[in-house]
Amino acid sequence: MEILKYTLPALIVLATAYLLLKKFLDAQQQKEWLKYQQQIADKKLPLKLQAYERLMLFCERIDLRNLVFRIRTAEMDVATLSAALLITVQKEYEHNMAQQIYTSDNLWKIIETAKDQTMHTITQFGGKFQANTPSDEFSNVLMAAAQTDDNPLNTARKAIKEEVKLYLN
């Protein structure tokens, strides 16, 4: 009985100290984890925003209005211009493929669809002309097609802006 009088209070103090120390250490570990997560988030956000900027630039670079002005020369015929435009769009896409790791799957599908529809437009309108025809009229048709409201690149630009808003708000 005498041993129990000394042992029981000591065990209670030891258990209390253990529980308090455990709670303190758990709280410290949680703080360190949150601090680490914040550091990761601080590094990730600029990378994500840079990826969205690159995708917006991609949309601008494959916009038919910009593309025709950048690629077309006076001596080009329809076949040469069409091939040059398709190659340029594909190269721009390949150059920006890595950006998909920073975007949602949904946004990347929209980007791919915009690229595919741009290439389809070039092919579709290029097929309406003789291959050796000067590219003037073909260029005008492409420019007109790019100015329509249902331009897939406009949809892609809007989707990029919407996804960026999710990170900035």
Image (cartoon, rainbow, N blue to C red):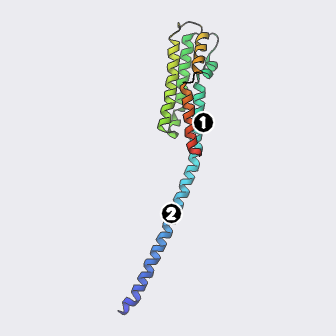
* Above or below 8: residue 88: above
Q: Nearer the viewer, residue 132 or 103?
A: 103
- In the image as oriented, which residue stretches furthest toward the left? 1
Residue 90 on image: x %, y %:
52, 24
Residue 131 on image: x %, y %:
53, 8
Q: Earlier in the sequence, mark 2 or mark 1?
A: 2
Q: Nearer the viewer, residue 112 or 47?
A: 112
Query: Badge 1: how crowded within 10 Å, few (<14), some, or many (20+)?
Result: some
User: Residue shown at 43%/84% (left/top)?
Assistant: 10
Give the SS element for disc 2: helix
User: Residue shown at 58%/9% (left/top)?
Assistant: 77
Residue 47 on image: x %, y %:
57, 42
Kindly indicate the quadrant of the structure image that contains residue 31: bottom right
* Above or below 131: residue 61: below
- In the image as oriented, which residue stretches furthest toward the front? 149
Residue 97 marker? none
For discs 2 and 1, the disc positioned in front in the rendered view: 1
Kindly indicate the quadrant of the structure image that contains residue 82: top right
Query: Badge 2: how crowded within 10 Å, few (<14), some, or many (20+)?
Result: few
Q: Point out the image quarter for the N terminus.
A: bottom left
Which amino acid type corresponds to the residue marked 1 in the rendered image? Glu
Residue 78 on image: x %, y %:
56, 11
User: Residue shown at 56%/54% (left/top)?
Assistant: 38
Give the SS element for disc 1: helix
Residue 53 marker? 1
Which amino acid type corresponds to the residue marked 2 in the rendered image? Gln
Between the C-alphas of marks 2 and 1, the distance is 36 Å
- In the image as oriented, which residue stretches furthest toward the bottom? 2
* Above or below 131: residue 167: below
Residue holding disc 2: 29
Tag 2 and tag 1, C-beta contact below 8 Å:
no
